[in-house]
Image (tube, helix red, strand yellow):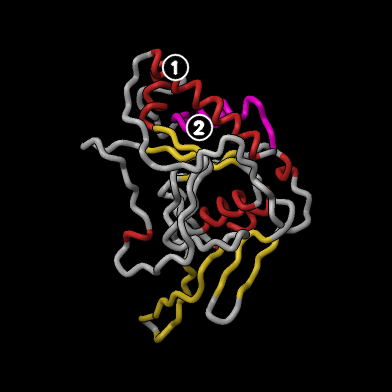
Amino acid sequence: MDLRGNPGGLLDQAINVADMFIKSGTLVSTRTRDETKDFLAKDDKSPLETLPLIVLIGPGSASASEIVAGAIKDDNRGLLLGMRTFGKGSVQSILSLDKDSALRLTTALYYTPSDRSIQAVGIEPHVEFTFLTKEGGIFEPFGEEKLEGHLKPKSMPEKPILVSSGDLLSELYKKEGLIKEELNPEHPEREDFMVRLAVRILEEPSADVNKLIEQAKIILQSDDEDAKRLNIQIKPPEKEAEGSKDKELKKEK
């Protein structure tokens, strides 16, 4: 599932999408000053509930797409690849004042099933990619936390399990002929390096997210060795990862 560049949509549609992949439990919660409302998965036995799943996310993933990604991550339903999402975790209500004007109020916040607020922290992928700027520094994507007057976060940012250089993988896959020199936006399969990596991980398909993480780790280690062999030199990522060698994700319901 590719949620990169998806700015979101309606809450009910996000719930419907997440429900197709998740068997049971809370998908998302909205929390106001006075109450919390949980939105639950339906027991409809969707055929997608047991399929291996990888979700691609990035800073252009916001609001409803973050709800889907957060539900899938917290349910341990699939592997998240990419970059941290935008962090649009607030609910707005429109109040009509008269014929020509209205007032938009922030009335609630979105919380993932593990009771984490999305606001100004976003959803962190299991496997995160870093990129260099033209000046040689680490690229820091624009998110909700950089907007003037944004609501302060209610949760601390998470850390990815694995961190890899997106620049290195992109250059490696070009040299190996796995992706084209320039990504054609009209190409139906959008075979950039993240899509190609997802395909390689799913060559050993599993609905167990821990197995997908381990497979990603093996592939990325092999890619690092191939990059050295081909003398592809990219500054290594400096962002800290959890780096848990044998980390097991415990499913909480």
To which quarter of the image does residue 101 belong? bottom left
Mark 2 residue element? helix
Give x and y (percent) for residue 200.
56, 25
In this rendered view, identify the residue nearer to me: 32 or 159. 159
Numbered label attached to residue 226: 1
Q: Residue furthest bottom?
A: 98
Q: Is residue 87 above or below residue 236?
A: below
Reading the image, the residue beneath label 2 is 195
| Alpha carbons under labels 1 and 2: distance apart | 19 Å
Quadrant containing the C terminus in the rendered view: bottom right
Count of picture labels:
2
Identify which residue is drawn at 39% across, 80% down.
Answer: 102
Please check the rendered image and state whether residue 206 is part of the magenta-colored stretch, yes or no.
yes
Region in magenta: 189-207
Question: For the residue marked with disc 1, what is the amino acid?
Answer: Asp
Give x and y (percent) for residue 127.
50, 39
Identify which residue is drawn at 50% across, 27% down.
Answer: 220
Q: Earlier in the sequence, mark 1 or mark 2?
A: 2
Identify which residue is drawn at 64% across, 42% down.
Answer: 248
To which quarter of the image does residue 121 belong? bottom left
Give x and y (percent) for residue 149.
32, 70
Q: Residues within 10 Å of mark 1 (few under 14, many from 20)?
A: some
Give x and y (percent) for residue 49.
72, 45
Mark 1 residue element? helix
Please check the rendered image and state whether residue 50 is part of the magenta-colored stretch, yes or no.
no
Quadrant containing the N terminus in the rendered view: top right
